Image: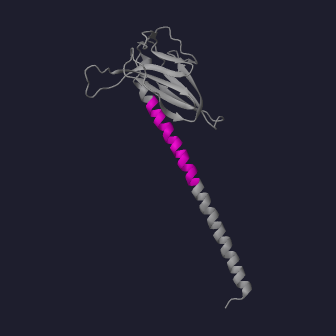
Amino acid sequence: GFTMVEMMVALFIFGMIASASVLLLRQTVEAEARSAVRLEEMGDLRRFSAIMAQDLTLMLPRPSRDALGSDRVALMSEDELLLGFSRQVAQIDPQPGVSSLQRVEWALGEGRLTRAIAAKADGAKTGAPVAILEGIDSARVRFRDKQGVWQTDWRPQRTDELPIAIELTLVQTGNAARPLTLQFLVAGGGA
């Protein structure tokens, strides 16, 4: 047999081990939850980056017209409209009357980076914007011209002129100290 003192010491040691195990388990669960949130954020950023890169790869050096018939330059960037341009999409089974040219507009509003598409490059209204990336406080766009100079405003001399690259700097909610900067090549910009 055990004496009462030995039994109390054994229970105390068991209690300490159990408490440490519960604490370790809780920390592991919390770390896993934080990792899951971070992985989801990284997945969202990768999806956004892939969509943006594809859009810019398909961008055309082509002016367009809005729904009212007013002329637009090939690449627009003003106020909340980060980027507005025409692109050509591949059609596997072309349908009569369906254009392979579309208008794409990227905008920032209410903490969301959105993308809207018009079925035609000329004269069609853009559809409802779709949120691509959430939790964005601000976004800044820069354009690299053919001379290799980065500009904050895109003011081309010709209406069909495109930059050779676009830089997008995003400030995420709660992470103002570490903005995210992405650079994309523009397919039609080298022409």
Judged left or right of residue 4, residue 99 is: left
57 in the magenta segment: no
Measuring from the top left, give residue 148's x and y in whole percent: 53, 18
Q: Is residue 161 above or below residue 167?
A: above
What's the magenta bit mostly, secondary-structure-wise? helix
Measuring from the top left, give residue 178's x and y in whole percent: 63, 35
**Residue placed at 50% from the left, 29% from the top?**
114
- Residue at far bottom of view: 1
- Residue at far right of view: 5
Q: Is residue 60 above or below residue 174?
A: above
Measuring from the top left, give residue 126's x and y in whole percent: 43, 22
**Residue placed at 61% from the left, 36% from the top?**
173
34 in the magenta segment: yes
Measuring from the top left, give residue 84's x and y in whole percent: 47, 20
The residue nearer to you, when weighing 43 against 114, is 114
Q: Is residue 69 above or below residue 93?
A: above
Position of the N terminus, as image quadrant, is bottom right
Q: Is residue 36 above or below residue 55?
A: below
**Residue placed at 74% from the left, 84% from the top?**
5
Answer with the quarter of the image where residue 180 lies: top right
Position of the C terminus, as image quadrant, is top left
**Residue placed at 57% from the left, 57% from the top?**
29
Report the span colored magenta: 31-52
